[in-house]
Amino acid sequence: QVQVVESGGGLVQPGGSLRLSCVASGSIFRLYAMGWYRQAPGKQRELVAGITSGGSTNYVDSVKGRFTISRDNAKNTVYLQMNSLKPEDTAVYYCNARKNWGTKVDYWGQGTQVTVSS
């Protein structure tokens, strides 16, 4: 079982920045694909950014150029640097660890609230 714990959310003004962190337990973190998802009230959960075990990244169009996902395998941690935040970025952000070989399994954190408001 992989434990996933997010941190770093909070209240920020429009145009501000936040960095989310996600720590996943286990000795094979480096093999997992990692992703940040978000869910706003009344909306479906959406993938914001993903990073493969090899370091390839992808982003939803609405955050391209503003958000950066990265990983530090030595620390079992994935980050989401969020710049130029907008009110529409307000959501609960969830970290996902995906085992995508053999029996595929998704592990989720409990979520961290990000609120962008003046």
Image (spheres, helix red, strand yellow):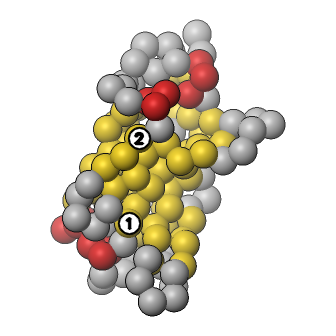
Q: Which of the marked residues, 1 or 2, is nearer the chain's N terminus?
A: 1
**57 vs 116: above or below:** below
Is any atom of residue 6 visible in this view? no
Residue 24 placed where, x, y %? 40, 69
Residue 36 placed where, x, y %? 48, 50
Give the residue furthest to the left. Answer: 74
SS for dot 1: strand
In the picture of the structure, the residue carrying the numbered disc 1 is 33
- Tell me the tag on residue 112: none
In the picture of the structure, the residue carrying the numbered disc 2 is 59
Residue 45 placed where, x, y %? 66, 47
Q: Residue at x 45, y 89 (%)?
A: 102
**28 vs 55: above or below:** below
Give the residue furthest to the right. Answer: 42
Q: Quadrant of the C terminus?
A: top right
Q: Splitting the image into 4 quarters, where does residue 88 fall?
A: top right
Three-letter amino acid code of the residue under disc 1: Ala
